[in-house]
Amino acid sequence: MSERFDCHYCRDPLHGKKYVQKEGRHCCVKCFEKFCANTCAECRKPIGADSKELHFKNRYWHDTCFRCFKCYTSLVNEPFMLKENNKVWCSNCTTLEEAPRCKGCLKPIVAGDQNVEYKKTVWHKECFTCSQCKQVIGTASFFPKGDEIYCVSCHEHKFAKTCVSCKNAITSGGVSYEDRPYHAECFVCATCTKKLGGQRFTAVDDKFYCVDCYKSFVAKKCGGCKNPITGFGKGSNVVSYEGRSWHDYCFNCKKCSIPLANKRFVFQNEQIYCPDCAKKL
């Protein structure tokens, strides 16, 4: 009598039938799938005796289920990456997924792509465009404004102040006088063209003069000392009478030299006198 050769689980005879040996035990195909087969990490079905099994780090797949989670390419005999939720990725999809994303098109920026980076944000070079005219800025100069990016031309037209003198946009720096903006190179002396930014100057009829030119060509001459009345330093107060002007410290009686600024005086024969001296003339 021959020795019995039965399934370890259901005790059905295995003579002449297909069986599986696992861990020193023999079992029929049906019991193998029910009690012994590994579960595919992808489709969650048993990996039967007739299926080709792949395994990695205590995880198992049908060979037909071992595909890239992203592009579905078969990864049998191909490099792969095991990521969260037991999903396998091909090397190409892994690279694309981990690459920084372009703020413009939201697609990955991979090695070899020309790109622009500003404040930890990146764009493909061709996606880095002006918010106004939509032209590609690329690596040219630009102006950020909040979350918007502007080329130089659009920023000038949209935001830059216009110089009162030349009527062109002021893109950097500039000088302001009485809330009116000027380019530094436009804010100059009307006579000698010296730049007046940060310097002492006098404005007369919408023209500006440096101290020297104002003294020489514009300022009235004092009727007393004959020097220019500039309004700078000593003599900033002026006395005017019948088209003539004096420094306040020069407006004195011709005879007794008493100061007459803000006092009664007599103007006679082109001279200034106090009332007492005028009586003695």
Image: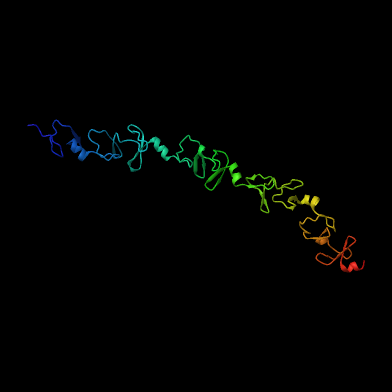
Q: What residue appears at the point 59 percent right and 44 percent down from the top-left corner?
A: 155
In the displayed structure, 114 sits above or below 211; it is above
Decide if residue 206 is on the left or right side of residue 102: right
Decide if residue 272 is on the left or right side of residue 105: right
Looking at the picture, tell me which residue is in the foreground, 81 or 274.
Answer: 274
Q: Residue furthest left?
A: 1
Looking at the picture, tell me which residue is in the foreground, 84 or 185.
Answer: 185
Quadrant where the C terminus sits is bottom right
The reply to whether residue 149 is visible in this rendering is: yes
Q: Identify the image quadrant of residue 72.
A: top left
Decide if residue 198 is on the left or right side of residue 71: right
Decide if residue 47 is on the left or right side of residue 102: left
Q: Position of residue 25 (x, y in %)?
A: 17, 37
Q: What residue appears at the point 79 percent right and 51 percent down from the top-left corner?
A: 218
Q: Residue furthest top?
A: 16
Quadrant where the N terminus sits is top left
Q: How is the model colour-coded?
A: rainbow
Q: Position of residue 236 (x, y in %)?
A: 77, 59
Q: What residue appears at the point 20 percent right and 37 percent down from the top-left corner?
A: 32
Q: Position of residue 248 (x, y in %)?
A: 80, 61
The reply to whether residue 24 is visible in this rendering is: no
How many numbered markers are drawn? 0
Q: Position of residue 275 (x, y in %)?
A: 87, 68
In the displayed structure, 173 sits above or below 229; it is above
Looking at the picture, tell me which residue is in the foreground, 106 or 257.
Answer: 106
